[in-house]
Structure formats: C-alpha cells, structure tokens
Image (spheres, helix red, strand yellow):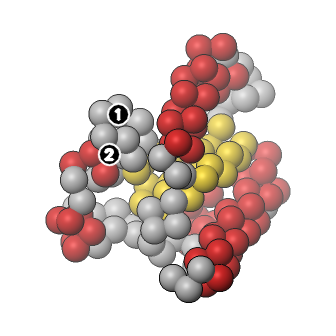
Amino acid sequence: MMREGESAAWQSACPPFLCTMRCMKRSKLEIELDAQLEEAGLLDGSVAEYRFHPTRRWAMDRAWPRQKIYVEVQGGIFVRGRHSRPRGQLNDMEKISEASVMGWRPVLVCSVEIKNGQALDRVRRALLFSDYQRSEKGG
C-alpha cells in the first residue's frame, strides 16, 4: 500500500531506511496541513513519515526527497506537549541537526501557522526557492 507522493519505482529503488514508516499515525495538524498542501498542488514528490537516517528511527512529518526539504509540525507547544518539554526539545534538536548535516532543510510549523496559512506559504516558498536554486545550477 503506497501513500500519496510515493511511486512503485521509488519504493523498489530505495534502501529500507529511506522508506516511509507505515505504522505511525498522522496527527490532526499533519492531516490538516496535508489537505492544504494537496489543495495547493504541493504534495507531488513528497512522502509522509519519511525515514531519512540510516541507523536512527527518525521520521520527517512530510518530506520532498528530491529537494531535500522537510516539514516538522510542532504540535502541543501551547499545552506543554512533547515539543515544548526539555527532553522533547533536546530530541528535536538532535534530529534536526542530523538532518541538516545530511543536507536537509527544515520547515518548522505550529498549529497557529497551519490554521492561518503561514505554514502553507512557508512550504511553498521553500519549494520555489529550491527549484530556483536548481535551475540556476542547471540541474
């Protein structure tokens, strides 16, 4: 069973650590952002719960592997959820730092930004900038 943005060719060509995590549940905020991205035509080439690291079980909430851009939804920050507690922040910093070392560019968003459209705008601009950079390099 493939998720949106996946193709059979991509699945068969990638090593197991790069494939998506199928067992994780998507949060309401992730689903809401996905609906906005789909309506804006920005889901093409993206993968939900993308496993990017060869040894760690980290997954990106939504990733565009070709552009090496990913979205992390920071839920629960106003109610002292996982992302706002010290241990959660340290874990997030480790994951984001490792992704950055591997050449990934994060787009961090929260519930307010998803609801007011800023998250969608930020993702759109990141993807446009990535496409612009690639065209400037001739690739």
Q: Quadrant of residue 40?
A: bottom right
Horizontal arrangement in the rendering, residue 22 relative to residue 129 (left or right): left
Image location (x, y in percent) of residue 95: 52, 33
Q: Quadrant of residue 32?
A: bottom right
Q: Tell me the crowding category of disc 2: few under 14, some 14 to 19, or many 20 or more residues within 10 angstroms, Cα based.
A: some
Amino acid type for the residue under numbered disc 1:
Arg
- The outermost residue toward the top is 86
User: Residue at 31% across / 51% down in the picture?
Assistant: 18
Residue 130 in sight here: yes
- The outermost residue toward the left is 12
Q: Are marks 1 and 2 in contact (CB under 8 Å)?
A: yes
User: Residue at 56% across / 58% down in the picture?
Assistant: 69
Horizontal arrangement in the rendering, residue 30 relative to residue 116 (left or right): left
* Location of residue 29 with respect to 92 vertically, above or below: below
Q: Foreground: 59 or 102?
A: 102
Horizontal arrangement in the rendering, residue 120 relative to residue 11 (left or right): right
User: Residue at 52% across / 52% down in the picture?
Assistant: 103
User: Residue at 17% across / 65% down in the picture?
Assistant: 12
Res. 57 mark: 1
Image location (x, y in percent) of residue 35: 58, 65
Q: Tell me the crowding category of disc 1: few under 14, some 14 to 19, or many 20 or more residues within 10 angstroms, Cα based.
A: few
Dot 2 corresponds to which residue? Answer: 21
Which label sits in the foreground, 1 or 2? 1
